[in-house]
């Protein structure tokens, strides 16, 4: 079944009226996608550490149980860190959603097929790992319903959204890692983010 | 002081520093410390499938304002090399407590190459290395590592020598 959804529209829909949603993006296309939807201090787009986006999301979700956390990553990035799905399944964070924008390609390196092009079913993996909700999405109305679940549903939530394997203009976020870290901490924690820890 | 007292001392240091998230890949040498962290209602003990996950976990925790520590065996350091790049480029605070294999008393030759390379690998990727060669020094090294990590955005590893752990055979390990 050929994908019909466009990744930028999908991510734009998921991040519309995002309010205080915390967003981690995997390196490459998904980092450009969340930036195209509108850069925010509450976003942490990665430029490396491939395979770790979901785990960064888990760390954030455990540290901020009152906030909703969304990880948006690609199929190649998720495949590199499949163990994270098992680790998240054990922790059962109610406030975490992991969404894979699945074009079945390594988009940054020449559009080589990923394992999902050969039938590997990431939503089934997440379900088997204990995610409370896990779906493969191919239709626009399912994207709209997923947006509601990300904001209000009981996690951990997983979705693999099948999208067209299109090459799109780059929309780059800042790439200074210290800036990306500090702006998120300030936006989340206020002035205390810059102050020495209390405990020493 | 008996060697088995160091895990309790380290657990007290973690609590005093306000560490809330403990990522771990089990090691026989960390058995007691893992149990103490699991039993501590102020801590989330998070079992990992591979050490790399602990770096993402620590980064996310700090983005959310919480301190963490990562427990692993020396062989696992080899799994961290690329992701330590994120720690360096973002200046994420990081504290790892690494129990050593491949040193004095090692019974498995396959543990030796990574054990020999651990300190150099960490140093190459910008992680400061503290060698805890005696049980009585482990907690002090952990305290210093926590302070430098969380006051100066440092990446710190405390290497707990194999002679502190004291396991010399498969049978002794199995009997733990």
Image (cartoon, grey):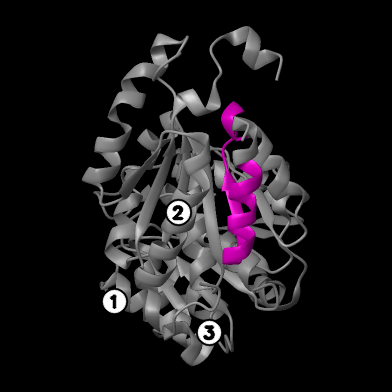
List the residue tagged with mark 2.
Answer: B95
When asked about the image quadrant of residue B151, the answer is bottom left
Magenta span of residues: B7-30
List the residue tagged with mark 3.
Answer: A188
Disc 1 crowd rating (10 Å Cα; few below 14, some 14-19, many 20+) is some
Q: State whether residue A53 appears in this view.
A: no
Task: Judge depth for marks 1 and 2 and give the one in front.
Answer: 2
Question: Which residue corresponds to the image point at 73% horizontal and 62% vertical from the top-left?
Answer: B42
Chain bearing mark 3: A
Q: Residue B57, position in %: x, y?
A: 52, 56
Mark sitting on residue A171 = 1
Tell me whether marks 3 and 1 sit on the same chain: yes
**In the picture shown, does residue A152 fall above or below A136?**
below
Q: Secondary structure at mark 3?
A: helix
Of A123 and A138, nearer the camera is: A123
Question: Which residue corresponds to the image point at 51% horizontal and 28% vertical from the top-left?
Answer: B164
């Amino acid at each position: 079944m050929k994908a019909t959804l466009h990744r930028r529209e999908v991510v734009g829909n998921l991040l519309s009226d995002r309010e205080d949603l915390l967003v981690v993006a995997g390196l490459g296309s998904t980092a450009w996608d969340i930036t195209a939807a509108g850069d925010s201090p509450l976003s942490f787009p990665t430029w490396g550490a491939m395979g770790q986006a979901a785990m960064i999301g888990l760390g954030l979700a455990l540290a901020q149980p009152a906030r909703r956390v969304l990880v948006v990553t690609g199929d190649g990035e998720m495949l590199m860190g499949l163990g994270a799905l098992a680790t998240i399944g054990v922790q059962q964070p109610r406030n975490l959603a992991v969404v894979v924008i699945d074009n079945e390609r390594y988009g940054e390196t020449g559009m080589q097929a990923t394992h999902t092009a050969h039938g590997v079913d990431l939503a089934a993996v997440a379900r088997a790992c204990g995610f409370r909700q896990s779906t493969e999405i191919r239709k626009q109305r399912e994207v709209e319903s997923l947006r509601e679940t990300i904001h209000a549903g009981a996690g951990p939530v997983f979705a693999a959204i099948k999208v067209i394997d299109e090459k799109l203009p780059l929309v780059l976020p800042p790439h200074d890692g210290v800036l990306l870290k500090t702006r998120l901490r300030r936006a989340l924690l206020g002035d205390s983010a810059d102050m020495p820890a209390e405990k020493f | 002081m008996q060697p088995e007292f160091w895990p309790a001392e380290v657990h007290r240091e973690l609590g005093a520093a306000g560490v809330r998230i403990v990522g771990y890949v089990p090691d026989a040498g960390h058995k007691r410390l893992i149990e103490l962290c699991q039993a501590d209602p102020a801590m989330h003990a998070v079992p990992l499938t591979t050490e790399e996950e602990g770096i993402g976990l620590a980064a996310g925790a700090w983005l959310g304002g919480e301190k963490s520590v990562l427990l692993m065996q020396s062989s696992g350091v080899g799994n961290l090399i690329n992701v330590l790049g994120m720690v360096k480029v973002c200046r994420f605070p990081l504290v790892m407590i690494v129990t050593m294999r491949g040193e004095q008393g090692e019974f498995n030759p396959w543990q030796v190459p990574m054990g020999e390379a651990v300190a150099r690998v960490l140093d190459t990727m910008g992680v400061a290395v503290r060698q805890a060669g005696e049980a009585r020094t482990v907690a002090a090294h952990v305290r210093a590592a926590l302070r430098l990590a969380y006051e100066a955005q440092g990446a710190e590893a405390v290497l707990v020598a194999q002679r502190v752990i004291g396991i010399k055979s498969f049978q002794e390990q199995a009997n733990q």
